[in-house]
Image (spheres, rainbow, N blue to C red):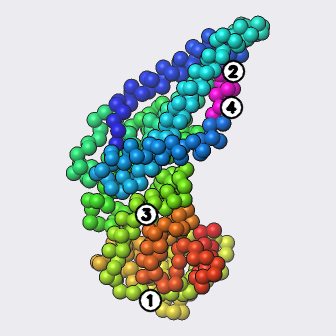
Amino acid sequence: MINIGPVVLWQVIIFVLLVLGLIIGLLVKTLGGLYFMGANVILLVILFFIAPLIIPPLGNSLNNAIKPLLNNIPQLQTASIIVANWLAIIILYGVWIIGTNTILFSVYIPVLRKQFKKVQINRPINYILGAVFGFCTMMIFTYFLTNLLSTNVFYNKNNFSQDLPTMINATQNDNDKYPNQFRHSAANKMFNWLPSWQVQKSGDAIAYWFWMAITLKNSSSLSDIIDEISNSDNFINNIDDALNGLSDNEKNNVVNEIIGPIVDKIDENTNNLPEAKITWTDINQSVTNWKNNNSNQSFNGAAIETMMTSQPNDESNPYYYFVKLREYGETTSNNSDFSTILTNGNKFYTTLKNIYLLGKITPNADTIQSFNAIVNKYVTEMTIINPGENSPLYANYQQLSSWFA
């Protein structure tokens, strides 16, 4: 976590930059302002296209320098490529914005300024449009800057402690884990209606996995981790943002190193549980029954919750095997934190969906194979990863895929 100082300082800087944009616009007037604004928009579009080609090699170059800085967090040290890629984004965009505008000015002052002065435009309109164009041009830069400053990697002044015991306690509270108040500032809210840049998404993903590593290292309970896996947004979104721009091999390595300890902990937590003896055919038949009986409704976690709590508690119930799965979770609740997923329809559905989506992103990661083996402790012949069309389990995988369609 990095201290960026008081929020008010950065709000003043953002305000000054926007005022500076107005002043420059007044000086260069309509055509000059249009030149800078138009050129910046075009150059930014070009950057969006070439960034995927530049960031990976730049990130790889930075990676070796970053690894030693993460000695205390093994998961992030091994997966330091995600930190390197984030820094590569900052460097690329920063250098691009500053460098291209330096070139634009070097062309404007000796060449274009005299040509633009020859064009006669109504004086008030000339200044007003120039100010508007200048302001809009500076908005592009401040838009990037606010996205960077609002990422959860940062905190402000003294509102965060690097003391390890304090940090461990902070894992219980999102306000303590993510104390960056700039994110809630007026300067950042100006751009809330616009999509976030990758620099913010990647930074947030780094902070998310930083705290996950702290939790794994210092907590014997699975409850916090289960909450994250069964969260419909945080888990898979942060994985996707962390893996953005990586090669397939790098994605597999990152998932193995970051998700691996989570799966190991789940495996340890469930290792001594008795077999559930519920087959995929039985479970999927219950889902088919529900879909046939509720053809006008979407199948989701609420549907599974309905099936888990349905009556009667015997095989005459078309959803009996979900009731049986819930009962199995209840009987093992004293021995496994993982049982909360088996007794809550929404958590069960969301966890499966998150791991299923992760399996589509990194199907060859060893961690996903391990999680698939854990799932089979509860539902035999179930697979959350694509086994290939020649596998006898391929039909089961297609059936699972239909749950999330």
What amino acid type is highlighted by mark number 3? Answer: Asn
| Bounds of the magenta segment | 36-45
CA gap, disc 3 and disc 2: 48 Å
Residue 237 - label: none
Can you tell which mark lies on residue 277? 1
- Kindly identify which residue carries mark 3: 256
Pick the front one: 202 or 8 = 202
Judging by the rendered image, the residue that carries numbered circle 4 is 42
Q: Nearer the viewer, mark 1 or mark 2?
A: 2
Residue shown at 33% from the left, 47% from the top: 68
Give 21 or 128, whichever is nearer the viewer: 21
Q: Which callout, 3 or 1, points to the residue nearer the camera?
A: 3
Q: Could you tell which of marks 3 and 4 lies nearer the N-terminus?
A: 4
Q: Residues within 10 Å of mark 3 (few under 14, many from 20)?
A: many
First in residue order: circle 1 vs circle 4: 4
Residue 247 versus residue 397 in the image, above or below? above
Labels 2 and 4: the sequence-earlier one:
2
The residue depicted at 42 percent of the width and 82 percent of the height is 377
Q: Amino acid at mark 4?
A: Ile
Q: Nearer the viewer, mark 3 or mark 4?
A: 3
Quadrant in which the C terminus is drawn: bottom right
